[in-house]
Amino acid sequence: MEIFLNLLLTTDYRMKLKHFLKNHLAIIIPFSVILIFGIVLLLTYSKIDIHLYINKHNSAFFDEYFKYMTEFGAFILIAPIIIIMALFKYRYALMAIASSVLASLIVQILKRIFYTDCPRPKVVFQDIYDLHFVENVHLHSSHSFPSGHTAGAFALFMVLALINKRPVWQFLFLMMAVLVGYSRMYLSQHFLIDVVVGSVVGTASAFTCYFWLNSSRFSNKIFLDQSILTSLKSMKH
């Protein structure tokens, strides 16, 4: 009997996993392809050559675009998006908060404890090559690995993609995170290796918090499925 129950639970788990994968192919497949592509580039070319290639392909339009796009990986824009999510469901907002905090914690541990001596492109290239810099963008000098903005963007937008049932929106949210990651290289704030690892940290954080807050431990918490709007309505009554 115990063996049968274990088999049943295993089968049920497999069915849920299969269902999850089927409903999130729009983010799983593209992210996997992009990640593999990034790893192949890192194994084929040096981070110097990759950064120079990206830096040479610039324009006035992209200077302005990526200067603002990169802010979607910063708290100043992450916080308002989380508040908007709370208007729909507290569970969604809590996923985003937990994911962002977890990603930030991992990034800071890596930056401050394990990889403290990682100069940014500004320092690496100062005696080698005159990089194209975007006007009015403050360039950092140290703690390059991994990219915190990229981790923050993937932590947020992957949660948005995971809670959305429409493949088109899932893919668009993923692309938003990818563009934030690319902006960090375009603005010469990070190297490709920093961005790749940042994307993995953010994505892992998003998936972890998504499954955690959808687990049996929290599935019956009715409060989590309410929102700011429903809370305000209940207060009026």
Image: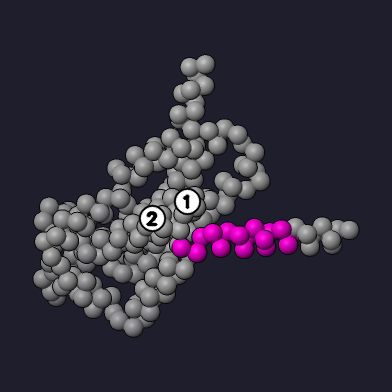
**Tag of residue 198:** none
**Tag of residue 173:** 2
Q: Tag 1's secondary structure?
A: loop
Amino acid beneath label 2: Phe
Q: Residues within 10 Å of mark 2 (few under 14, many from 20)?
A: many
Viewer-proximal residue, 115 or 198?
Answer: 198
Figure quadrant of residue 130: bottom left
Residue 223 image point, x, y percent: 57, 32
**Residue under label 1:** 164
Residue 192 image point, x, y percent: 31, 69
Q: Are marks 1 and 2 in contact (CB under 8 Å)?
A: yes
Amino acid beneath label 1: Asn
What secondary structure is the stretch in magenta mostly built from? helix
- Left or right? Give the position of 47 relative to 113: left
- Left or right? Give the position of 24 relative to 172: right
Image: 55 above or below 41 = above
Which region is colored magenta?
A: 10-26
Figure quadrant of residue 228: top left
Alpha-carbon span between mark 1 and mark 2: 9 Å
Report the residue at 48% width, 33% height from top: 227
Is residue 151 in the magenta section?
no
